[in-house]
Amino acid sequence: MADDHWSPHWSPRQPTAQPEPLFAFIRPSDQAPMPCQLRFYGESYGWEAQLLERGELHVSHGAFTTRAAAVQWANDMRQAMESESWSDPLPPVPIP
């Protein structure tokens, strides 16, 4: 039996809502503006937190089942980036 829903040109589902601004800060090491936003992709995928550097995606993590978990990850990343010892590449941050 053929699968009527299969497509060789499948692409991931796009966000259903506009990004939700969460916070913004200036990274001390190079004075780069670092806004953070949340996106919700629906119940099957969940929440994604995105940190931007000068308007371009710098780092993100998704598949959080709750908004609170995405916010916690974003705050942990912000704390790491604002620390005196910050340097790229990204330090390991626990993923809830």
Image: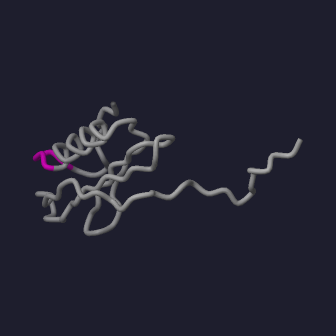
Q: Which of 82 and 30 is in front in this view?
A: 82
Residue 50, placed above or below residue 46: below
Judge from the rendering whether residue 90 lies leftward or rightward of residue 23; answer left or right: right
Number of marks in the rendered image? 0
Instruction: Choose between 32 and 50: the one closer to the eye.
Output: 50
Q: What x and y, as percent, mark residue 7?
A: 74, 55
The quadrant holding residue 74 is top left
Of residue 83 and residue 35, the one placed in the foreground of this image is 35
Quadrant housing the N terminus: top right
Front position in the image: 6 or 52 = 6
Q: Where is residue 40 in the image (x, y as percent from the top left)?
A: 39, 50
- Which residue corresponds to the image point at 41% horizontal and 44% vertical from the top-left? 62
- Extreme bottom residue here? 55
The residues colored magenta run 82-86
- Where does the C terminus fall, quadrant-wise? top left
Q: Which residue is drawn at 43% across and 42% down?
A: 46
Colour logic: one colour
Q: Is the magenta stretch mostly helix, strand or loop?
A: loop
* 18 inside magenta stretch: no
Image spot of residue 34 (x, y percent) = 21, 60
Residue at 30% across, 36% down:
69
- The location of residue 43, given as percent across then percent down, is 46, 41
